[in-house]
Image: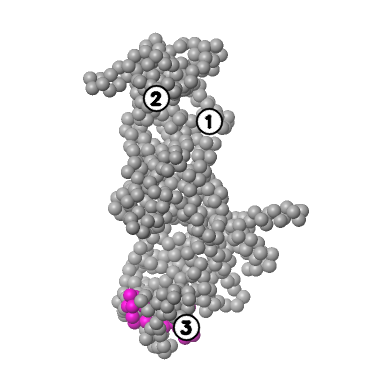
């Protein structure tokens, strides 16, 4: 490899890859790269977690390493098995698998307790009898030193006795905590005698009622990394100020010769028009503003999957946005573009009429049926050609007809011609209305020699409009759900004087019950994806769609119309 090429490759590395490659050159950790993805099982994963999944698993794949899936299950008051199962399903759906069996912080409760005892014996931890509220007040502010607890200088023997009694269930919740003895004057608030253990009288989803004290995240996380031999603990930027504490705890349990994890922070994913807070997403679910965690308007991985996103599109999006050191906001249109780019290559083109208007071709024989040939995907000739039935009675979109059409309306209007895609040119001769003046039917004629691809001069005749359509006799009924962005504001949780729910989009879901689809979709499988000609990309709903009761979700329109619409 030339020197120039090596230099170019180094420039293309993100800063985490540069750190890892430097470690490998120095044979640090014996040349091993071992990462982990450590979600809390207190909710469903969202697109921000998808970025972290792609990063952690991707780094290990690139450097022939391994990745653990570890659940940070240290708060049983918020954790559920449902979340554990969903997280494992999401990781696998994205195309990744972890090393061995899933790990849990609860696997290490005995070891963590022993290390807490060790830190107490070294005089660097104490039991505090004060309330959590008072402890919080005494921490001070970034510009004001904290106040030392009156229990800070208890003897080692007394602290060991009290901590053992905490473990044995002698105290109520909030009555006592174990704190690290570090520095109440530290400019880093996280170093001001942080809590290591608290009493929680909650049944744990794995350990039952064996424990009534639970370690705090900052104590459990780094030590779990250490136990598992993690080399690079990659986390989001909000944990940067936690790093000195991460390292302090490790120093107090570390054995020389072992692998010591290194924490590296990167900027979390912030998306426009999107809420990323688990707490706020849970609020949307609990208040029935959305229909569960997998509602296709949610940014959860399961919601995106149900909407019709592909794992390939999400991985491509994560790769495109890259890894940054500082927070920024990514336009959600980039995520949608990644999806369109993927579906454009893989989704079959089909014809579906969402708001049907009936057409009768008066000069087409009543008993005649024929088939027109249409390509499944012009981007991939290997996807082949299908045949679609054509008959006297058809459906077109209501929006594709206008009785008093302006000059540049190139769809159907009285005495105007359009081409039916892959079929014939038709002309509107008569408009039928009901007693209230609503248009119920169009009477048209067709040019028998204008069939697409027939090789006649008439078939080559040019008209300015081409419409999609479905044969009325052969149409398949379906429900179609038109999903749109859940919020109308670019930063719905960025307003101090307003609640994020004030920016909910009232048109984020429109349900159409009387849609007509071409017959090839009759047995469409859940999660199969299509481009409805001229309308957008759609996916068969994985939860509600059943044989005889088809339900399609709009995944994304063909083009991003929001950039102009919302300015």
What whole-number distance in Å separates the C-alpha atoms at marks 1 and 3?
67 Å
Q: Residue at x 74, y 54 (%)?
A: 4
Q: How many marks?
A: 3
Label 2 SS:
helix
Query: Magenta region: which residues?
Result: 111-135
What whole-number distance in Å separates the C-alpha atoms at marks 2 and 1?
23 Å
Q: Callout 3: 10 Å neighbours few (<14), some, many (20+)? A: some
Q: Residue furthest left?
A: 435
- State the residue in front, 474 or 461: 461
Q: Is residue 277 left or right of residue 236?
A: left
Q: Can I make out residue 258 in this image?
A: yes
Q: Toward which corner of the image does residue 306 lie, by quadrant?
A: top left
Confirm or deny contact between disc 3 and disc 2 (CB under 8 A). Answer: no
Q: Position of residue 480 (x, y in %)?
A: 36, 35
Comes first in the chain, label 1 or label 3 = 3
Tell me the tag on residue 400. Answer: 2
- Answer above or below: position of 163 versus 72: below
Q: Position of residue 184 (x, y in %)?
A: 44, 80
Label 3 SS:
loop
Q: Is residue 519 left or right of residue 385?
A: left
Comes first in the chain, label 3 or label 2 = 3
- State the residue in front, 440 or 120: 440
Split into 4 quadrants, where in the image is the C terminus? top left
- Answer above or below: position of 368 versus 510: above
| Residue placed under numbered mark 1 in the picture | 377
| Residue placed under numbered mark 3 in the picture | 124
What whole-number distance in Å separates the C-alpha atoms at marks 3 and 2?
76 Å
Comes first in the chain, label 2 or label 1 = 1
């Amino acid at each position: 490899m030339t020197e120039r090429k090596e230099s170019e490759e180094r420039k293309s590395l993100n800063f985490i890859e540069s750190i890892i490659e430097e470690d490998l050159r120095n044979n640090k950790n014996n040349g091993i790269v071992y990462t982990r993805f450590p979600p809390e099982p207190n909710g469903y994963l969202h697109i921000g977690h998808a970025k972290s999944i792609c990063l952690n698993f991707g780094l290990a794949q690139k450097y022939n390493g391994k990745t653990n899936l570890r659940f940070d299950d240290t708060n049983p008051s918020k954790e559920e098995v449902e979340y554990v199962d969903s997280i494992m399903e999401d990781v696998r759906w994205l195309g990744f698998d972890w090393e061995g069996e899933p790990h849990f912080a609860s696997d290490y409760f005995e070891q963590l307790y022993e290390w807490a005892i060790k830190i107490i014996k070294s005089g660097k931890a104490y039991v505090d009898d004060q309330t959590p509220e008072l402890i919080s007040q005494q921490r001070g502010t970034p510009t004001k030193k904290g106040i030392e607890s009156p229990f800070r200088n208890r003897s080692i023997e007394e602290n060991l006795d009290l901590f053992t009694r905490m473990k044995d269930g002698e105290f109520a919740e909030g009555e006592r905590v174990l704190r690290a003895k570090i520095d109440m004057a530290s400019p880093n608030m996280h170093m001001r005698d942080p809590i290591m253990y608290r009493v929680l009288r909650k049944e744990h989803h794995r350990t039952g009622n064996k424990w009534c004290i639970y370690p705090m995240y900052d104590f459990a996380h780094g030590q779990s990394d250490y136990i598992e031999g993690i080399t690079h603990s990659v986390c989001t930027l909000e944990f940067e100020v936690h790093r000195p504490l991460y390292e302090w705890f490790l120093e107090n349990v570390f054995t020389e010769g072992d692998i010591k994890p290194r924490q590296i922070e990167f900027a979390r994913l912030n998306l426009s028009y999107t809420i990323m807070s688990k707490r706020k997403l849970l609020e949307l679910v609990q208040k029935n503003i959305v229909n569960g965690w997998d509602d296709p308007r949610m940014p959860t991985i399961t919601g995106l999957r149900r909407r019709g996103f592909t794992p390939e599109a999400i991985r491509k999006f994560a790769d495109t946005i890259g890894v940054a050191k500082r927070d920024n906001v990514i336009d959600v249109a980039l995520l949608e573009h990644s999806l369109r780019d993927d579906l454009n290559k893989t989704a079959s083109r089909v014809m579906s009429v969402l708001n049907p208007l009936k057409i009768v071709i008066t000069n087409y024989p009543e008993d005649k049926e024929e088939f027109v040939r249409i390509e499944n995907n012009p981007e991939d000739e290997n996807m082949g050609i299908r045949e679609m039935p054509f008959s006297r009675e058809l459906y077109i979109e209501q929006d594709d007809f206008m009785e008093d059409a302006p000059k540049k309306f190139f769809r159907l209007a009285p005495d105007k011609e359009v081409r039916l895609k892959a079929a014939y040119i038709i002309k509107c001769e008569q408009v039928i209305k009901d007693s209230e003046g609503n248009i119920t039917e169009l009477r048209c004629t067709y040019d028998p020699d204008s069939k697409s691809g027939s090789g006649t001069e008439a078939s080559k005749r040019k008209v300015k409009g081409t419409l999609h359509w479905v044969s009325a006799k052969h149409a398949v009924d379906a429900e179609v759900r038109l999903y749109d962005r859940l919020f109308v504001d670019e930063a719905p949780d960025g307003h101090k004087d307003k609640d994020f729910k004030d920016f909910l989009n009232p048109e984020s879901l429109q349900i159409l019950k009387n849609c007509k689809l071409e017959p090839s979709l009759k047995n469409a499988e859940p999660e199969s994806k299509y481009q409805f000609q001229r309308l957008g990309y759609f996916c068969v709903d994985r939860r509600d769609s059943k044989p005889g009761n088809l339900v399609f979700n709009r995944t994304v329109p063909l083009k991003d119309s929001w950039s102009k619409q919302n300015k």
